[in-house]
């Protein structure tokens, strides 16, 4: 029996430039899809997968994330006075248990690998999960739960993957695949943002990772890669040979909420997935098509 993964890192220190001006003073991860911020979807997904410690890597202008996962006494008091018990209970379900959340700060946005490295003292010598809240996944069970089930069998470094159009490989980390049974792809390498002509496949990494602590030894070297940033994928690639590396094709649909169109589509998809909103969303859509 493998040691269960109990800790998850949520890197939320990026600048979110594609969503300016919305992200000037508000983190991208607090953008709501329907009525829930992106970061809460990620935390709920992690909780469903058995995660018990939530480590946020924050930066400037990110204090609203800390507030979101804390009591809001004034609001709770007002809801109580007005007898809005259901809303009050819903707010309480958002709260992690006391001591389950910790925050560390990435002082400069030097890349995703650097953000994850900032959490090394919180994770120490144990396997851990990384979730990028702007990759929002509609699936039951959640993507991380599906990954944990596979991880318990295979161990190693496991990342969620999906096929992307050939012309889009330069936006993703792409796997160099040895074998692929349609669910799990064993890889010999990993290339960050390759142009379509040199991409080893079209199998791309999306924002869910289950990683071994060996990745930190590579991140310690602080080597920069694509875009001059310290890339998480480069550090994972360098552990191949020491730690097996696999891609997992999850069941579900991913929405890239770091991109405007992806974010709009996610709102429609999650709206249509909600019983209380489905009919209304359909009516709205009919007006436009
Ligand atoms: P993105 O690549 O989407 O970058 O980061 P970004 O800065 O957030 O957004 P744009 O491209 O400027 O619009 C993917 C995830 O990694 C985190 C981000 O917060 C996001 O959740 N990240 C990225 C960090 O925490 N630190 C970094 O230095 C870079």
Image: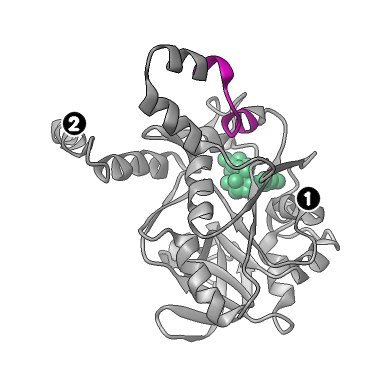
Q: Quadrant of the C terminus?
A: top left
Circle number at residue 284: 2
> Quarter-wise, where is residue 242 in the image?
bottom right
**Secondary element at tag 1:** loop
Magenta-colored segment: predominant secondary structure: helix
State the scheme by which the image is colored.
one colour
Residue 88 image point, x, y percent: 44, 26
The verdict on residue 39 being magenta is no
Q: Is mark 1 within 8 Å of ligand 1?
A: no
Residue at image position (78%, 50%) is 118
Is residue 202 visible to the viewer in this orientation of the structure? no
The number of callouts visible is 2
Using a 10 Å C-alpha cutoff, classify the residue at mark 2 as few (fewer than 14 neighbours), some (14 to 19) or many (20 or more).
few
Q: Quadrant of ligand 1?
A: top right
Residue 181 image point, x, y percent: 42, 85
Residue at image position (56%, 68%) is 159
Query: Which residue is at the far right?
Result: 221
Using a 10 Å C-alpha cutoff, classify the residue at mark 1 as few (fewer than 14 neighbours), some (14 to 19) or many (20 or more).
many
Residue under numbered circle 1: 118
Which of 207 and 139 lies nearest the eye of the viewer? Answer: 139
Residue at image position (42%, 78%) is 183
> Quarter-wise, where is residue 35 in the image?
top left
Q: CA distance from mark 1 to mark 2?
A: 44 Å
Q: Quadrant of the N terminus?
A: bottom right
Residue range highlighted in magenta: 65-75
**Secondary element at tag 2:** helix
**Horizontal side of residue 261 vs 259, given as left or right:** left
Residue 140 image point, x, y percent: 35, 59
Against 5, residue 102 (above or below) is: above
Which mark is first along the chain, 2 or 1? 1
Residue at image position (72%, 31%) is 60
């Amino acid at each position: 029996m493998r040691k269960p993964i109990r800790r998850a890192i949520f890197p939320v220190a990026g600048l979110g430039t594609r969503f300016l001006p919305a992200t000037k003073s508000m983190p991208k991860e607090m953008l709501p899809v329907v009525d829930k911020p992106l970061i809460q979807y990620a935390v709920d997904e992690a909780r469903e997968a058995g995660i018990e410690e939530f480590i946020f890597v924050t930066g400037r202008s990110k204090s609203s994330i800390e507030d979101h996962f804390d009591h809001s006494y004034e609001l709770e008091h007002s809801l109580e006075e007005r007898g809005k018990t259901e809303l009050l209970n819903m707010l309480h379900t958002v709260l992690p248990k006391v001591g389950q959340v910790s925050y560390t700060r990435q002082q400069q946005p030097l890349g995703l690998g650097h953000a994850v490295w900032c959490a090394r003292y919180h994770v120490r010598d144990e396997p851990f999960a990384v979730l990028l809240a702007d990759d929002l996944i509609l699936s039951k069970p959640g993507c991380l739960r599906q990954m944990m089930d596979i991880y318990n069998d295979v161990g190693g470094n496991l990342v969620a993957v999906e096929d992307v159009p050939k012309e889009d490989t330069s936006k993703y980390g792409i796997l160099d695949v040895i074998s692929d049974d349609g669910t799990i792809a064993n890889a010999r390498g990993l290339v960050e943002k390759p142009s379509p002509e040199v991409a080893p496949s079209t199998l791309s990494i999306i924002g869910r990772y289950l990683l071994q602590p060996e990745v930190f030894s590579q991140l310690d070297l602080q080597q920069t890669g694509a875009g001059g940033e310290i890339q998480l994928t480069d550090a994972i690639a360098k552990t191949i040979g020491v730690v097996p590396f696999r891609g997992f094709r999850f069941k579900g649909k991913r929405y890239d909420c770091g991109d405007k169109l992806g974010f709009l589509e996610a709102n429609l998809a999650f709206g249509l997935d909600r019983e209380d909103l489905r009919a209304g969303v359909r009516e709205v859509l009919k007006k436009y098509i």
